[in-house]
Image: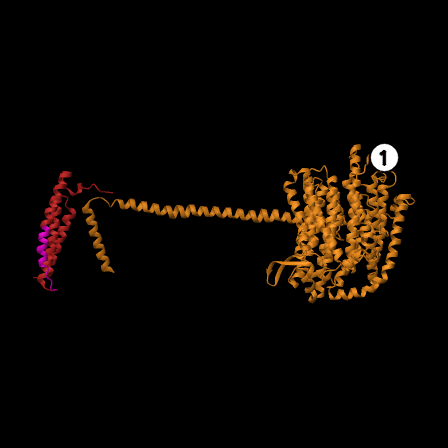
Chain colours: A orange, B red
Amino acid sequence: MESQFILAIIILFIPLVSFVGNIFFGKRLSRGGDWFSISTVGIGLLLSVILFFQMIFDYTVPEMADAQILFNWVNLGAFKIELGLLVDNQARIMLLIVSLVSFLVHIYSTEYMKDDPRYSRYFAFLSLFTFSMYGIVISASLFMIYIFWELVGLSSYLLIGFWFEKKSAADAGKKAFITNRIGDIGMFAGIMLITSHVGSFAFSEIYTGVADMNTTILTIGGILLFLGAVGKSAQFPLHVWLPDAMEGPTPVSALIHAATMVAAGVYLVLRIFPILTPEAAMVIAYTGGFTAFGAAIIALTQNDIKRVLAYSTVSQLGYMVMAIGVGSYTAGLFHLMTHAWFKACLFLGSGSVIHAMHHALHKVGDHETDPQDMRNMGGLKSKMPKTFWTFLIATVAIAGVPLTSGFMSKDAILGGTLAYAMQNPAHLLLPVFGFGAALMTAFYMFRQVFMTFYGKPANEEVHQNVHENPSTMTIPLIVLSSMSIFVFYAFGKGFHFNFAHGWFQDLVPVPHNLTQSMTGFLHHLEHSIHVAHYPAMAISVVIAGFGIFLAWLVYFKKKISAENMATKMALGYKLSFNKFFIDEIYQKRIIDPFLWLCRKIYWFDYNILDQKVIDGFGRLSILGSKVAKTFDDVVIDNWIVDGFGRATLLIGRKLRRLQTGKLQQYLAMAIVGVVILAFLEKLM
Amino acid sequence: MNLQLMLIVSAALFSLGLFAVITRRNAIGVLMGVELILNSANINFIAFSRSGIWNVTGDIFALFVIVIAAAEAAVALAIVLNLYYNFKAINVDEASELGG
């Protein structure tokens, strides 16, 4: 076995060790066992960095056969279930993302969760989550990915509902779990559809095995598999769980909803990219585009600092999905990576603000004010400089300002969508979605910065008590924000500077083993991408600048009143503020009728099935038993059994009289008997 | 000699003997009845032997029967004596210890 597989196995299982250790012995370890989790994740990070730099120095794209190791878990001849590791460049990059964000979140949590009564359990769950996520990343078969997929679902449920005393948190956990399950059903169906044709779960066999598959069925299979990603990556219409999941501790939001769990969906789409048909890819592109656009609209009007970020995440995930849908495979993963850094930074930054606000409010004795509402903040820049600067860098990156990682990745996606629309002018809506979302992203992110860090404090007394958090919280912010600077992505082979075409583009090319129709489709697209690249870059810079300028006007200079705008566009504001009433629609059109149906079925179950049928059987058998008992008692026992006894007794009593003891009588009777026998013989 | 006549005599003798056995209360009387039955059998043996119908020579059995009857009478009288010692009577009715 080559070294990369050994390293990958260790990376995979080491968080499991810390999960088991902390869940059983966490309370007995010093400091609740947090050092145990941190050191195991730290080892994972170290090994991931080794794997990553192995890739950078090798600077090759390995053939799939060289990057994977498979073994049969179940072998039934024509049907087999393989498990295995696939350590290609994508997996190495994802391993680095997951392990670094997880490591920083672990460190950050030691401060953020300091006084929590279930401190060690929290770290155990974090480790479990990290384990499951590693599993998805290095799976070489759909079956194995599905196992870890569900494990991620479970651990996210545990983490989102970590403060389960709060009803909203418990509900959010449930919502995330159930919503994900809906997507997973689709994914499961997709796996079965593909596997029943190919006869194997391994990616390497599926990629080649679908070549002779009916195109329509393959399209349906691709879309079904994508449904799993719709659930995990919070795409419309299953995005509703992600904003609610903000009920979990903020570091969890950074881990789950920025870097890892939601990225799993995108990663799955990347893994199934070689079996997608252009039609399936189009569905994916529109889902992503629509999500990116719609979520950005909602983010415009939210006041909760984490909710803005939540919708921003949904929107950015939409970007990634759209990128893959339009064939910009590389850009999709690139944005996944850059987004992981700056969104984790933003979440941890918001956590830092919330933590500080919470303590300040506590000190003042104010338990009513919401520490997460941006309207209660303002002017925090001078009080929390480290948080502010890191938050600003991440904001600039997500807005797509040049010289940031976000600019590079977003630009690649927008270029891809523009090229797609140039090739097929009917799909003009996709770049419109893309650029529109980019404009709104710049606006709402700077709205957030201005509302939180600039302006007059909402409450002077609280403001006085706000302090910068200790270095365990700020160092992760600094690390993550520095990852948003372009230099990390702007060098090629041998560390030569190349802004437009860095190592990422070289090491994660579009796979060559695509479906036939997709290969042709992408081939046509290639020319348009070159043409579209620079216009897309120019437009995105202008749009980002315009968005920032608008936010500056409204929320910094207050030249335009936000209230006036809201009243002028009352309908739009209402729709955005209430998240297009999607939750309400689900409640009214799906959940309520469903519950109504459940109640009816319950009524039927209880009143008819239980009371009438099942209890009826009971009553019937009691009745039957009574009849049988009477029959037994009277007929069998009294009449037959006792009857034999009585008859015997009676006959005996009668016959006893014959036994007189007088020989002469006996003899007389014997003679009578002989005479009778003689007569009988004569008669016969 | 007429065989039928002889058989009638023997049957009558048998019936009388039997009647005596059944009805006599005195044990001696019962024994006498038994003698009559035995002798009716003797008559039969001799009658069949004499008639020569089936070439049977049963007359020799009559001798045996007479000897055995003598022995039987001796044994039976001994029993009757015992009976008398036990019950102070020779009435067979009174020797009914067994009875339902």
Q: Quadrant of residue B97?
A: top left
Residue A64 relative to residue B12: left or right: right
Tag count = 1
Q: Quadrant of the N terminus of chain A?
A: bottom right
Q: Is residue A88 visible?
A: yes
Q: Quadrant of the C terminus of chain A?
A: bottom left
Q: Which residues are magenta?
A: B54-69
Q: Give the amino acid at mark 1.
A: Glu
With respect to residue A220, does A113 lie above or below? above
Expressed as whole percent of the image width and height from the top left, the position of residue A151 reads 67, 50
Q: Nearer the viewer, residue A322 or A621?
A: A322
Q: Nearer the viewer, residue A595 or A42?
A: A42
Expressed as whole percent of the image width and height from the top left, the position of residue A360 reads 80, 35
**Dot 1: element:** helix
Q: Quadrant of residue A660?
A: top left
**Looking at the image, which residue sits at the far left?**
B1
Residue B71 relative to residue A53: left or right: left
Q: Residue beneath label 1, please?
A: A460
Q: Is residue A591 visible?
A: no
**Looking at the image, which residue sits at the far right?**
A559
Mainly helix, strand or loop, the magenta region?
Answer: helix
Q: Which residue is at a point 21% across and 51% down the rendered structure image?
A: A670
Expressed as whole percent of the image width and height from the top left, the position of residue A327 reads 78, 60
Q: Nearer the viewer, residue A559 or A663?
A: A559
Q: Is A185 part of what is drawn in magenta?
A: no
Task: Tell me which chain the residue with mark 1 is part of.
Answer: A
